[in-house]
Image: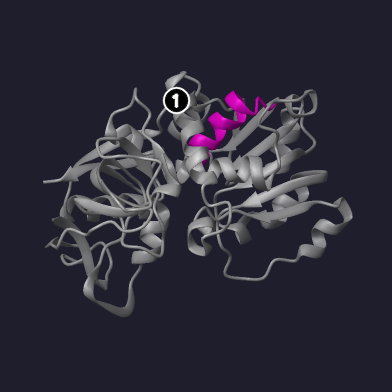
């Protein structure tokens, strides 16, 4: 099978950042599916894993954590899907990735592809949709069925135009039906995108956040979802969060955070890492299968839309390197997608 991998962890300026490969096609076992990958998308986690370091790989490492494709074979214990089914998923960070013609994946973290989306449009969604859904409903504990209280609540999404922010905004407004959803966006085009995704308004992350909220009539927010460097915004999140509010971040920090600053407000801090269930094979691992199917239903109903903004062509070393370059620029909106290997 064709694949795109790496032997060294190199910058995107290197001609050998990624290498086009020919590998043996794997065979599914147990509850695994063998999926022919029709499209993939690229996330910031891909660039973080690939960032330059001295480590080398032999055989080559295949990364990538977002795919849509067709099941071609199943392991002996697989029961949720059968050959011919169209699926989408984010895979496991501990397993060989999706930048290949075929991939093995645990069926318990796989969902049925939304029938009204192309494979490219579907590939834009899994990792970010799982992250956003888990963050909103499992970490921030918003009710999936809106209540009077939740419909009066406010949410700030830091980095609203990114992949997670784009789908989180939709879920917060269209499914949780929060009263006010605010995004940070530093450019006119990213602000316009946040509005298109459902945000009530945007504020500039390069300026103090609280005065901008106050200018819009908010003295704070009940919930915060941080999709940007945590340490960069932690002090402002402490200022912005309402008493007894909850904040969740998806970005690791390279320095300690003073949690004592949240004590006076009895505020709750939570991490979200969508690979936790697959990494530890948790007892509720199949919740990601259920979650992705809920997202598919919402997409098919027109409640949610794909966040794909650009397809860079077929999956090969050149196009994948370009996708990583664009992600590292920090200027992307929505999701970048590649179609199947050619």
> In screen coordinates, is 161 left or right of 137?
left
Q: Residue at x 18, y 57 (%)?
A: 3
Looking at the image, is 87 positioned above or below residue 200? below
What residue is shown at x 15% (from left), y 65% (from top)?
15
Q: Which stretch appears magenta?
A: 164-178
Q: In which quadrant of the rendered image does the N terminus lie?
A: bottom left
In the image, residue 334 lies at what x, y percent? Answer: 41, 38
* Horizontal and vertical percent position of residue 326: 31, 49
* Rendered image coloring scheme: one colour
Give the residue at the far front of this rendering.
76
Check the image and name the residue furthest to the bottom. 54
The one nearer the camera, 241 or 29, is: 29
CA neighbours of label 1 inside 10 A, class few (<14), some (14 to 19), many (20+): some
Secondary structure, mark 1, is helix
| Residue that sits furthest to the top in the current view | 301
Magenta portion: prevailing SS class: helix
> Does 255 appear above or below 156?
below
Out of 120 and 185, give the one closest to the viewer.
120
Residue at position x 82%, y 64% from top? 260
**Residue 195 visible in rendering:** yes
Residue 327 versus residue 27: which sits nearer the camera? 27
User: Circle 1 sits on which residue?
Assistant: 299
- Magenta residue check for 233: no
Residue 98 in view, yes or no: no
Q: Is residue 273 left or right of residue 12?
A: right
Relative image position of residue 86 (x, y in whole percent):
30, 35
The reply, left or right, for residue 148 in relation to residue 123 is right
Picture layout, residue 272 above or below residue 154: below
Residue 127 in the image, given as x and y percentages of width and height: 44, 46
**Left of 52 or right of it: where is 14?**
left
């Amino acid at each position: 099978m064709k694949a795109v991998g790496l032997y060294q962890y190199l910058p995107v300026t290197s001609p050998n950042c990624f290498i086009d490969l020919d590998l043996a096609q794997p065979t599914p076992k147990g509850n695994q599916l063998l999926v022919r990958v029709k499209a993939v998308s690229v996330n910031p986690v891909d660039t973080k894993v690939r960032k330059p370091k001295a480590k080398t790989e032999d055989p080559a490492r295949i990364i990538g954590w977002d795919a849509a494709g067709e099941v071609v074979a199943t392991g002996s214990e697989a029961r949720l899907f059968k050959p011919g089914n169209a699926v989408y998923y984010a895979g496991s960070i501990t397993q060989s990735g999706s930048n290949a013609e075929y991939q093995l994946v645990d069926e318990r973290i796989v969902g049925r592809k939304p029938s009204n989306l192309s494979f490219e449009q579907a590939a834009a969604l899994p990792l970010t949709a799982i992250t956003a859904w888990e963050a909103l409903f499992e970490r921030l504990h918003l009710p999936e069925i809106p209540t009077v209280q939740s419909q009066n609540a406010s949410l700030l999404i830091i980095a609203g135009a990114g992949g997670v922010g784009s789908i989180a905004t939709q879920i917060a407004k269209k499914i949780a039906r929060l009263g006010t959803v605010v995004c940070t966006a530093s450019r006119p085009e990213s602000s316009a995108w946040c509005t298109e995704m459902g945000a009530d308004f945007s504020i500039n992350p390069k300026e103090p956040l609280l005065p901008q909220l106050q200018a819009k009539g908010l003295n704070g927010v009940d919930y915060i979802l941080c999709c940007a460097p945590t340490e960069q915004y932690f002090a402002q999140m402490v200022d912005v969060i309402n008493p007894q509010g909850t904040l969740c971040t998806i970005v690791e920090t390279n320095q300690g955070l003073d949690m004592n600053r949240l004590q006076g407000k009895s505020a709750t801090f939570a991490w979200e890492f969508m690979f936790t269930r697959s990494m530890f094979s948790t007892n509720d691992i199949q919740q990601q299968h259920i979650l992705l199917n809920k997202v598919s239903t919402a997409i098919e109903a027109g409640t949610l839309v794909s966040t794909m903004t650009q397809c860079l062509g077929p999956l090969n070393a050149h196009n994948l390197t370009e996708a990583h370059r664009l992600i590292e620029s920090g200027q992307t909106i929505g999701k970048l997608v590649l179609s199947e290997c050619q």
